[in-house]
Amino acid sequence: MNYRFGINMKIVWCITGAGHLLRESFQVMKRLKEEIEDLKVTTLVSRAGEEVVKMYGLFGELYNISNGNYYEELILEREHPYSSPITGRLSLGKYDYLICSPATGNTVAKVVNGIADSLVTNAIAQAGKGFVKSLIVPVDYKAGIVTTKLPYAIDKKKCKLCLKCINVCPNGAIVKRDNFVEILLSKCLGCGNCKKVCPYNAIIEGKEIKMRVRKIDAENTRKLMELEDVIVLKHPYEILEFFNIR
Amino acid sequence: MNYRFGINMKIVWCITGAGHLLRESFQVMKRLKEEIEDLKVTTLVSRAGEEVVKMYGLFGELYNISNGNYYEELILEREHPYSSPITGRLSLGKYDYLICSPATGNTVAKVVNGIADSLVTNAIAQAGKGFVKSLIVPVDYKAGIVTTKLPYAIDKKKCKLCLKCINVCPNGAIVKRDNFVEILLSKCLGCGNCKKVCPYNAIIEGKEIKMRVRKIDAENTRKLMELEDVIVLKHPYEILEFFNIR
């Protein structure tokens, strides 16, 4: 075990609605739990974050990070009152760190304008007020083009409309259109059953696409760096470096 | 048929909560459907947009624009998950254009600050990230005074309290107060039954009022022009010009 910042450490992990850097964020939080003895993680998931975590098939893994015990609660914004007790703990400085990874352009835009009207933006604001250091990984770090990976998608050229995937989908997320089959991302749980059963290798996971990082989002990331007790990181892996974990 | 921009064109039309330029926006979208062969329009209606469209009696016309087929869905923010699949299609660049008309001061204010916490502001953000061009018609183009038309209103001077209008209203949107009768705009469906039955010509449709375009809203419209792939238009009719439709 190697820990640099005291024992019985308590961290809030905030997840917002971005697929970009999401898997890497999960990997990092898992490593922190492994490496830092008695680390307690309270996880806050925004509404959009919940949808995206499900799309990427990672929802189940949340319980490995936050098992529900005291200071290890899993808080879904959808289920929680607006200024839930968790943010009170932050104002009282009862956590050692707040980590927000991935942080969407929307979350960063609100934070740098002092807006705190959602579970995560309010948590970040209270952390700032309660002298709790925030490590924030914005998905829009620098203006330009980024490559990101999609959850499951069907390659129409390879698909033979055998419909085997539809029968194995546990959440009815695959639908037959006129002449093709579509995965409804808002219902997909990312279980991968469809990919396993497809005889034609037509179901792709992690297809890469290019996306623009807009100037406004990059400009907001720059403003984020000026907030008290906020450390802006380029990538979730830099969180491990921060905690001296190789 | 005259179309300038390829065939099988797919457009997202976003409606937000403004009565100003709303009828003209509906006229334009109807013309685009008539003039552009195989045009598919997915319509996104914000919560406030839904209320205002109903007030102006235009809700039924939405189905002429988006009949529910694939890529012709009518998405009401009230009924839809936060990062609904539609915004995913925009990040993947699967639409040719996004049109937001009318765009309220609130929508423009959020967009220019990078805030994307609603169906429409998220759609505009994903369009920018997915290299989809946006044509935006802000109701607050230039600081000063604009004239706009109201939906139905009762002229108290002419009204004789005969209450005939109350009996013909299909949605209970007209109420008797102590000494006058009032149309509740939030319930009015704009059907016009009341106007037809009123013996005293006391019900007016499209009463003109003057409104101020505030400096902050005009300033946000100016900032809108600086966003990548965003074209700001003064009036919905300029959308027809953009598509070379006389």
Image (cartoon, coloured by chain):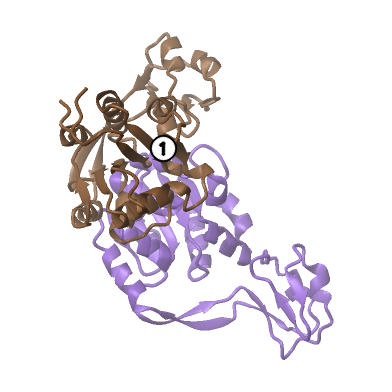
Chain colours: A brown, B purple
Residue drawn at the location 48% of the way across and 31% of the way down:
A184
Residue B236 visible to an observer of this rendering: no
Residue B54 visible to an observer of this rendering: yes
Instruction: Estimate the x, y position of residue A63 in percent, counting from the top left.
Output: 43, 27
Q: Quadrant of residue B170?
A: bottom right
Q: Is residue B192 above or below residue B86?
A: below
Mark 1 burial class by Cα count in 10 Å: few <14, some 14-19, many 20+: many
Type of residue at label 1? Answer: Tyr
Chain letter for mark 1: A
Residues A97 and A139: in front is A97
Say which quadrant the N terminus of chain A sits in. Answer: top left
Q: Is residue A233 above or below residue B208?
A: above
Circle 1 sits on which residue?
A71
Instruction: Estimate the x, y position of residue B74 in percent, counting from the top left.
Output: 54, 47
Residue extending farthest front = A7
Residue drawn at the location 39% of the way across and 53% of the way down:
A122
Report the number of discs: 1
Residue extending farthest top = A199
Residue drawn at the location 39% of the way across and 28% of the way down:
A56
Residues A220 and B234: in front is A220
* Horizontal side of residue A156 vs A235, given as left or right: right
Say which quadrant the C terminus of chain A sits in. Answer: top left
Residues B181 and B95: in front is B181
Instruction: Estimate the x, y position of residue B17 in percent, counting from the top left.
Output: 51, 64
Mark 1: which secondary structure? loop
Instruction: Estimate the x, y position of residue A17 in percent, counting from the top left.
Output: 38, 41
Residues B73 and B78: in front is B78
Q: Is residue B52 above or below residue A167?
A: below
Residue drawn at the location 68% of the way across and 67% of the way down:
B188
